[in-house]
């Protein structure tokens, strides 16, 4: 029997997945949660063989939880089940020690097969997505520049970026100028759009572009 932990914040999807998985004779959901903070605690308590995690969880996101789970309970393998089937999401998942990556529009049988293969020690990644991740344009931005741009992408002003990242306003402006030059943009908004399209920004950041435009 393969013991499973399921973390999904959308109640209807989570219950539907539990029903699907419990129909399999060799799968048993032993823990479920709708918040990222509970993932590691429940895993340490219930000792699942495989944890199936959504990325966009409230509070602690699924990839942060996956990395912590990999450190504290290495016997538990992790699968990301997400709607964010992008190269940057895959790279972040692999960095977090995730063994399987499944998009939510996959056939139900694919998830079940992925669980069994990951439990057996395999790594299961969609081949086309893996190739896309390898072929993605190299990111020219430093980690600090990326942090500044990501903060700008969720609608933060220069003052707010400076406060959140413990920088001076002048330093933030200098970073933004360098970022615009590096990516070949004409404005902050265009730099955000280019970085998002190239997969350098975290996928959920994209919605912030609209808020940013409203606050220019």
Image: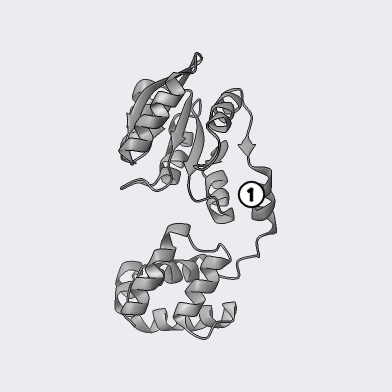
Q: Is residue 75 above or below residue 198?
A: above
Q: Nearer the viewer, residue 209 or 70?
A: 209
Relative image position of residue 65 (x, y in whole percent): 41, 41
Q: Quadrant of residue 216?
A: bottom left
Q: Nearer the viewer, residue 118 or 11?
A: 11
From the viewer's perspective, tell me whether residue 197 is left or right of residue 216. Answer: right
Is residue 181 visible to the viewer in this orientation of the structure?
yes
From the viewer's perspective, tell me whether residue 204 is left or right of residue 181. Answer: left
From the viewer's perspective, tell me whether residue 32 is left or right of residue 144. Answer: left
Relative image position of residue 101 (x, y in whole percent): 56, 40
Is residue 142 visible to the viewer in this orientation of the structure?
no
- x 44%, y 38%: residue: 53
Task: Name the image colouring.
Answer: one colour
From the viewer's perspective, tell me whether residue 3 is left or right of residue 133. Answer: left
Secondary structure of residue under mark 1 = helix
- x 47%, y 68%: residue: 144
Q: Is residue 17 above or below residue 3?
A: below
Residue occupied by mark 1: 129
Check disc 1: other Cα within 10 Å, few if <14, some if 14-19, many if 20+: some
- x 69%, y 51%: residue: 131
Q: How many marks?
A: 1
- x 44%, y 65%: residue: 206
């Amino acid at each position: 029997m393969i013991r499973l932990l399921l973390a999904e914040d959308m109640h209807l999807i989570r219950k539907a997945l539990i029903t699907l998985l419990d129909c399999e004779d060799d799968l048993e959901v032993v823990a479920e949660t709708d918040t990222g903070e509970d993932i590691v605690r429940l895993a340490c308590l219930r000792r699942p063989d495989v944890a199936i995690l959504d990325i966009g969880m409230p509070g602690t996101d699924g990839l942060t939880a996956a990395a912590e789970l990999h450190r504290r309970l290495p016997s538990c393998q992790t699968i990301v089940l997400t709607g964010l089937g992008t190269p940057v999401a895959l790279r972040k998942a692999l960095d977090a020690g995730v063994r399987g990556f499944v998009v939510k529009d996959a056939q139900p049988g694919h998830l079940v097969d992925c669980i069994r293969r990951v439990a057996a020690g395999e790594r299961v990644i969609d081949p086309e997505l893996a190739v896309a991740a390898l072929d993605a344009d190299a990111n020219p931005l430093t980690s600090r520049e990326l942090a500044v741009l990501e903060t700008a992408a969720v609608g933060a002003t220069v003052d707010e970026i400076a406060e959140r990242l413990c920088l001076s306003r002048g330093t933030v402006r200098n970073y933004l100028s360098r970022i615009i030059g590096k990516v070949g943009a004409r404005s902050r908004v265009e730099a955000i759009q280019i970085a998002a399209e190239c997969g350098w920004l975290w996928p959920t950041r994209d919605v912030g572009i609209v808020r940013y435009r409203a606050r220019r």
